[in-house]
Image (tube, rainbow, N blue to C red):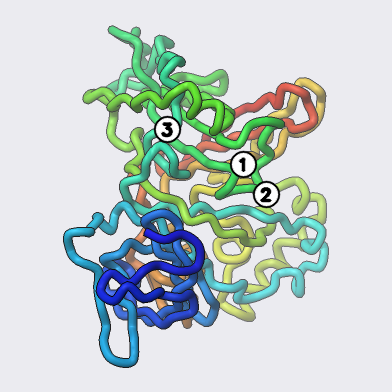
Amino acid sequence: MATGDERPDEETGSGGPTGQAVCIVDGAFKGLPGTLAGFDGDEILVDLDIFGRTTRVRMYQHQVSLSTTTRQRTIDPADYLPPARVQVFGMRATRPLPVDPVRFLPELASMARTTIRLHPHRGEPEAGDSSVGGPLLWPVTEEWPTCSVPYVDPGDFEVDLEHRRPVPLVPVLQLYQRDVAALPFPDGKDVLQVLWCPFDHRDDRGGTWPRPELYWRNEAATRAEGIGLTPNPPQDIPSGKVPQPCFVDPEQVTEYPYEDEDELRCLGDDRRLRLEDIKEQTGWSYQSHLSVAPGVKVGGWPGWTQWPDWPTCRCGRRMDHLLTVSSDEYDVESGLRWAPVVMVRADIDPRTDSISRGFSPTDLRIGDMGGMYLFICPKCPDAPWASRFDCC
């Protein structure tokens, strides 16, 4: 296989230059025309026109047909790789903001934040991929973490049980800096890993939740040590606590705070009236459609399902929102705006239309369809972190 901008033609031996017209013959983009953009190892880079914008995707040989003036040639089926192994970036785009809430509440302009929606979708990620619920880049020299803390009896939340044996933690999220550069990686680190004990534990507020752990790593140093295997989760774990393996498709969007955040509450009671005007005049709800992006995401505003509960660092400052892991990506109402356009029609009317798919690709159930929120203090040298949970 050639590298760079050309790939030999197996039939003729002639070059296949970038810019050549191709057609997708298998997978999610089957039938779409595209333009050859280059090669990366065994993967073919193709530029597609998706919803009016050029998106670069990674395909395998069996998925791409080289279109010429005389023929179309597909790659030999013997080179087949399952579509589930294909990591495609740029496919899951959020519809543009249908109504600018700043027009109704100008104070919102200073509260806009950027979040990275991760758009988890089922696949077969490997340790070298950013993923939800996938195998981790774990050094073979480091023992896999376990939990021995008493947990809540799944059949009776009033009873705490002792573990009969240490429980291996479960991979929840792995993010590489190359995929999510906006994460505040500590110096010398370029991989973030989040695991948790999948059994619920009682916290100091009376809630019962999984126990998360957070790790920062250096990819090159970890690979130099050798990569260990990610263990299979125990068989007796309650349902909804082990995420299904998913690739991610990071997308940067702008969001605004929920109505109950202090930044909005300090504007007075008339803020609610001004926000309600949005729905009366346009049909779009500020809370459900125009404020906080739901689902698994990095940065921005937390997608609380209850009252905001920001942790305070030992240095005295309010911690920054690092990421959210949510039970679902959206619901029937919020999905009218936040469902990726590939999942729904592009011309949705919130007053008459509905959606019916794509809600929870991870199969997580945190409490009653709630979320986990991780926070960090980037000002302190050791980057302390804290977690919060809530549910409906």
Q: Quadrant of residue 129?
A: top left
State the mark number for residue 260.
Answer: 2
The N terminus sits in image quarter: bottom left
Foreground of the two, 192 or 170: 192
Q: In the figure, is residue 305 to the left or right of 228?
A: right
Q: Which residue is mark 1?
A: 307
**Quick check: marks 2 and 1 in contact, CB under 8 Å?**
yes
Foreground of the two, 140 or 116: 140
Q: Mark 1 to mark 3: distance in Å?
A: 33 Å
Which amino acid is tagged 2? Answer: Asp
Q: In the figure, is residue 76 to the left or right of 187?
A: left
Give the mark, 2 or 3, whose residue is nearer the N terminus. Answer: 3
What is the secondary structure assignment of the residue under circle 3?
A: loop
Q: Quadrant of residue 290?
A: bottom right
Q: Quadrant of residue 162?
A: top left
Give the residue displayed 67% in from the left and 49% down from the top. 260
| Residue 134 seen in this snapshot | yes
Q: Residue 233: x percent and y percent?
A: 29, 26
Which amino acid is tagged 3? Answer: Leu
Q: Residues within 10 Å of mark 1 (few under 14, many from 20)?
A: few
